[in-house]
Amino acid sequence: EPEVTQTPSHQVTQMGQEVILRCVPISNHLYFYWYRQILGQKVEFLVSFYNNEISEKSEIFDDQFSVERPDGSNFTLKIRSTKLEDSAMYFCASREIGLQETQYFGPGTRLLVL
Amino acid sequence: RKEVEQDPGPFNVPEGATVAFNCTYSNSASQSFFWYRQDCRKEPKLLMSVYSSGNEDGRFTAQLNRASQYISLLIRDSKLSDSATYLCVVRSGGYQKVTFGTGTKLQVIP
């Protein structure tokens, strides 16, 4: 069964450093998403991406964040200058175009900012 | 009022019991509703979509009440493997953004 993959599974970084989280969505999916989940809290929407552009973003997704689809398979989330409060699990998700709304989530990247 | 609200639990139930969770949403224009399951430190996985007419998948039944703005999930004959956090997810309008509830934790006890 096809699945969303994410790398790395864990990342530790120093405050102020840039991080890039990588995702490979399911191959025939055209909508891509990033979510975060701070430990013990709910899953929060960050951004959706379709047709090579951001289709929607939340108030969390400020200028420190950017997304990119650098080639036909990868979908990345960049945090330019990490803060302590960016420590969270980051999930990538993808879905097909059309009426089927099911989003398939990757296993997540656990980011720890020190 | 929170966009999507759930009782965090935990619900501790014996094996074989029936358990029900409710979730309320604040936006009356919400269009799509889902129940996801999340195991500890894992990704959310779709359990079922919720349709206006209600729908059933094995031991799981989901209902939508638009008038009262809530959805429900009923689990019959609980198994130990049902222990997880159940997330209510709502999509509003013609947008891509979905809103997650905080989740309801279920612990099925032998």
Image: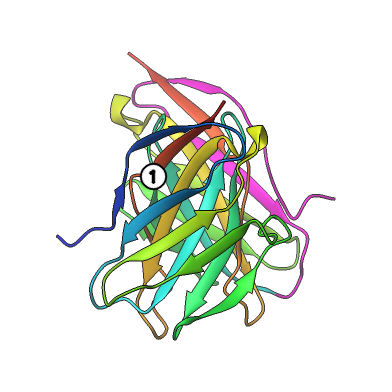
B6 left or right of A48 in image = right
Q: Residue at x 67, y 79 (%)?
A: B93
Q: Is residue A98 above or below residue A109?
A: below
Residue picked out by circle 1: A108
Q: Secondary structure at mark 1?
A: loop
> In terms of depth relative to the viewer, which is nearer, B92 or B66?
B92
Q: Read off the magenta span.
A: B1-29
Q: Residue at x 39, y 73 (%)?
A: A69
Q: Would residue B18 be visible to someone looking at this image?
A: no
A3 left or right of B99 in image = left
* Magenta stretch contains residue B17: yes
The mark total stands at: 1
x and y percentages locating residue A83 in the rendered image: 65, 38
Q: Residue at x 42, y 44 (%)?
A: B37
B32 left or right of A9 in image = right
> In terms of depth relative to the viewer, which is nearer, B12 or A91?
A91
x and y percentages locating residue B35 in the rendered image: 48, 53
How would you rate the neighbour count of disc 1 (Cα within 10 Å): few for under 14, some for 14-19, many for 20 or more? many
* Magenta stretch contains residue B53: no
Q: Residue furthest top?
A: B110
Q: Quadrant of the C terminus of chain A?
A: top right
x and y percentages locating residue B61 in the rendered image: 43, 53
Give the image quarter of residue A62: bottom right
x and y percentages locating residue A73 in the rendered image: 26, 71
Q: Which residue type does callout 1 highlight?
A: Gly
Q: Is residue A87 above or below residue B109?
A: below
